[in-house]
Amino acid sequence: MASSPCGGGNFDCGLQIQTRSVEQTLIPLVSQITTLINHKDKLKKTEKTLRAVQRVGQAVSVAVGRFVAVGEAIAAENEDLRDEMGLACFEARRAGTAIAQLTDVSGLEQCEGDGRSTVFSDRTGMVKAARMLLSSVTKVLVLADCIVIKQIISSRNKVLVTLEQLERVSTFQEFVQIFSQFGNEMVEFAHLTGDRQNDLKDEKKRARMAAARAVLEKCTMMLLTASKTCLRHPDCESARINKEAVFQRMRLALEQVIEIVTDTRSGGEAKALPVSIYAGIKDFKVKVECLRDSLYCVSCEAVAAQLEALVEKTEDFTDSAYTRHEQRETIIQLCQITRQETKQLINTWRHAQSLKAKEATDEMELSILKTCQSVSDLRRELHRVAVGRATELLKLHSDHLVLQALKASGGDGNLEAVADYAGTLTEHKEQLVETCRLLCHVSGTEPLEITCIHAEETFRVIGPQIISAAQTLALHPTSKIAKENLDVFCEAWESQLCDMAILLKEINDVFEGRRGDKKTYLSLPRPGKHSVSLKTVKAAKLDAEEQTSIAKLGLELCLLTSDVDSEVERWDEQDHQMVRLCQITSSMAYSMYLFTRGEGLLKTTLDLFHQAEVLSDQGLQLCHILHSLSTQLLDEDRILVLSETEKLSDACQQLQVCAKTPVQGKSAIFQKVDSSIQNAKDILTVVVYLLPICNKLIRKCKSECSCVASPQHRREKRLNTTVSGETLNGKGSNGFGVKSLEQHMASLSFLESK
């Protein structure tokens, strides 16, 4: 509920706040009111204190007046909310006036003589006015938020109507006309839902929204080619099946978006996620560790039953035909050890209860430690099995041989060969679906669980669609449209494999405690606030067509960031300056990749260009380190490092020039975005090549060093010095770290932030 965080009282307005923008808008107001309410009862009424109280009260009153004016303007434009919004605005204005009167303490002695109430004499009245103000302001904000929800619903309804028209068309001319309208409506829907996704407070809802939007994005192109194929070959059953599956998937995704924004489900009750093994283990450990404080907080039977439920879930691993024998045996053995340790814990627990002990005995403490350790060992093994299998499958499918074979067989009109390869693809699909299910068990967070479920569903659906598209091509081998349709579905499969690789890395990051590293190094400017050189540049968002054309380049950039992270993990010295700079560079490039998907914290092209400029600065710092390294190397190695350093320097300078060059016009801005992503990609390509070489050379230098502290040894020690605190905190760069951004955002008034 929308409760005030202030300590002076519980200001629960009874309204559900779903978005961060509404919440952030309320924070400064809550802070000001808290200042007024939480004064000491016997506060010295000095002139300075009286001026401060009056100043805060006036600030609240003025801000409320401006805020109410905006609310009344919104009410005038939305007839169905006019009465409710008008009442909320009236209450807010009345509360603001009451607060202004209570804080008007310029002539305190006269006020007290006249019997007029002030914040000092009528604390109850102040609390009541504050409660009314927060309640009414929150109601205005939530009602304004309802308008955004209505816009999304209205946009979805337009898309659905056009979707039904597309499904019924019978001629190419009619299809082209309606699809053009459909494209424009989808662009509007994408912008509205993208903004909503980034604004949602709930991480699970954001993950569900991201999954639904990903389906709509990929299905839009599938819908185009599948419909064209059906129009060209109206009597082809496989083409009809292919098309119907796309339309059905789009409708489900549109429905899911509405369920998220309205916080309802068409079937009634909200569908709960199945409890993963990770979540089960986490809850089990919490209950076991709580026994240290109280022997009666949970029953022995409940702990034993929860463990058995966990062991039962591990059957997804042990019953799998794709789990190796030794892995299966290890999991079963660890389950047995956990059972034994839990049984021993329950025995010591019951013994302690029989002795009327108030807290865990030493023997029981030892059992708690052993039980938690055994269940952690089980979790580690399950993670190793799931991640290992996913890694193997991604390597196995990296060449896409089955897809190529399906394309070739379909193009040759060989239905028998298509059937054979369809069987192979179905087997691959089942492997991937099961692997996604195992990854869901060990993902570590609910948003990642949702992403795993989305990946599982995507593979389950796209597999049969590829087969039906291949069958259509085999029946019509000369059809260019049928070939194009198969290509689109194969690309969707390949794209999902890339998404799975990213998901795998995120799961590993959570497991190893690196969650959130990507955000640490983001540089997020506030246009016109932090950068004088960018004041005159107009910020813009890419439309759907531009987003699609840039997506492939962005995906290539994303894969390079994964390569950089993989190479960095091979270094023994994780605190080495080169490692840290490469991590920063990779993180910034990853945020640029998210921009190409319409996600992440870089919202506009201006944000992207500023991020590119800071990335180039980091790259040039890396060049400086590489030059230092080259002075320690022999001729051949030095020439190699200097040659690659020169390439890196050139790429950084090109990116810097590109980011700083002002452009005007939509096509010029898009070209600049394209060039920025390409230049960032060039930088990471050199970094990926250099990392293993430098790692090897630094190891070689160390092994050749004598124990005597020679001048070379001293130089090497200087080379391996970690980054200074200033650099890591962003003081040595031109960027603005997340911490400074948050401080800046907190200083904005609540009216500006809305």
Image: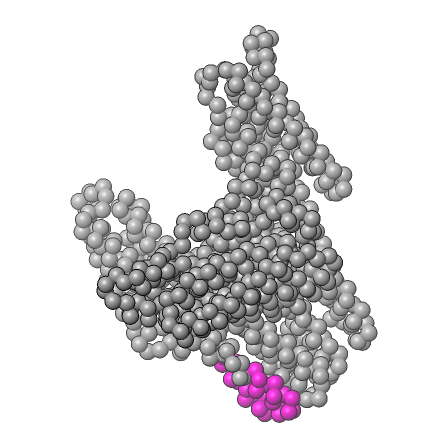
- Image quarter in which the C terminus is found: top right
Q: Is residue 682 magenta?
A: no
> What main secondary structure does the magenta stretch of the protein show?
helix
Camera sees residue 749:
yes
Residue pictured at 37% horizontal, 72% vertical: 634
Instruction: Give percent across and percent down for residue 205.
Output: 55, 54
Which residue range is magenta in the image? Answer: 403-428
Q: Is residue 753 above or below residue 213?
A: above
Q: Is residue 692 above or below residue 620?
A: below
Instruction: Give percent across and percent down for residue 47.
Output: 53, 15
Residue pictured at 68% horizontal, 89% vertical: 477
Camera sees residue 273:
no
Q: Nearer the viewer, residue 506 or 571?
A: 571
Q: Is residue 413 magenta?
A: yes
Residue pictured at 66% horizontal, 26% vertical: 94
Color style of the picture: one colour
Q: Nearer the viewer, residue 632 or 232?
A: 632
Q: Nearer the viewer, residue 135 or 40?
A: 40
Q: Is residue 709 left or right of residue 48?
A: left
Residue pictured at 60% horizontal, 36% vertical: 749
Instruction: Give percent across and percent down for residue 256.
Output: 61, 59
Looking at this view, name the residue that lies furthest to the right.
173
Q: Is residue 350 left or right of residue 514?
A: left
Q: Is residue 744 left or right of residue 84?
A: left
